Image (spheres, helix red, strand yellow):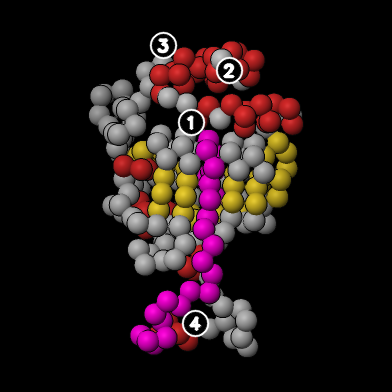
Amino acid sequence: MTVFPDPNCLFPIRLPDGSEHEGTVFLRNAIDHPQFEVGDFTYASDFEPPLDWATHLAPYLFPFSQEKLRIGRFCQIAHGVRFITSSANHAQSGLSCYPFQVFDEKARAGFQPDTRDTLIGHDVWLGHGAMVLPGAQIGHGAIIGASAVVRGTIAPYSIVTGNPGSQTGQRFDTNAIDALLDLAWWDWPTSLISRALPAIVAGDIKTLQQVAE
């Protein structure tokens, strides 16, 4: 029987010798940032674990930024993933994109040309080196391929690869996707998800629906 991890731990994986694998963290427990929100069981991995996971993953997201980075539950964030949030964007309405205002203390106050939030749904897999651009909205269950550069709205359960990122497929047929979005198993209590794990792992939507009932 699979043992469900403690959502309040920092290092959810133990190596064969019993030591904690410090290269993988439950991200919610590894960050303290007012603009960075993460759901339970979402993990991030890195071959060189940083001291500051929030800055490592989202280097332009400052405590004073006007946008938020929101990541759902049960997401999987591989080594090298970066979120380029809206604070990184320059104004494009003038004759130059040069950010003159940031060098002047008075002009800098409240100055931020782009304030869009970046939203990552539940159960999203972000592959090695993927880059998520400002204002992206990635739907539940999507897979973002290695080194993909993602912007805009990504449909739930779609598969996105390349630069610029484009949808190359979807994980399930439309009926199955609708059923999964209706079930929203990621919002269930841990005890119910534990009961449903065999169906989730086997891709058995019918049994998952029976568990929900």
Of marks 2 and 4, the one in the foreground: 2
Residue 37 appears in view? yes
Give the distance between the C-alpha atoms of the residues marked 2 and 1, in whole angstroms: 14 Å
* 52, above or below 185, in the image: below
Lower position in the chain sequence, tag 2 or tag 1: 1
Q: Quadrant of residue 108?
A: bottom left
* 96, above or below 119, in the image: below
Asked whether the residues under the numbered discs 1 and 4 touch, taking CB atoms below 8 Å apart as contact, a structural biologist would say: no
Residue 34 on image: x %, y %: 35, 56
Residue at 49% x, 56% y is 83
Quadrant of the image for the N terminus?
top left
Asked whether the residues under the numbered discs 2 and 4 touch, taking CB atoms below 8 Å apart as contact, a structural biologist would say: no
Q: Which mark is residue 89?
A: none
Q: Which mark is residue 99?
A: 4
Amino acid bearing label 3: Met
In the image, which residues are magenta? 104-130
Quadrant of the image for the C terminus?
top right
Residue 118 magenta-highlighted = yes
Residue with the mark numbered 1 = 187
Lower position in the chain sequence, tag 4 or tag 3: 3
Give the distance between the C-alpha atoms of the residues marked 2 and 4, in whole angstroms: 52 Å
Give the distance between the C-alpha atoms of the residues marked 2 and 3, in whole angstroms: 17 Å
* 9, above or below 69, in the image: above
Asked whether the residues under the numbered discs 2 and 1 touch, taking CB atoms below 8 Å apart as contact, a structural biologist would say: no
Lower position in the chain sequence, tag 3 or tag 1: 3
Give the distance between the C-alpha atoms of the residues marked 4 and 3, in whole angstroms: 56 Å
Residue 125 appears in view? no
Residue at 57% x, 59% y is 135
Lower position in the chain sequence, tag 1 or tag 4: 4
Residue with the mark numbered 2 = 208
Amino acid bearing label 1: Asp
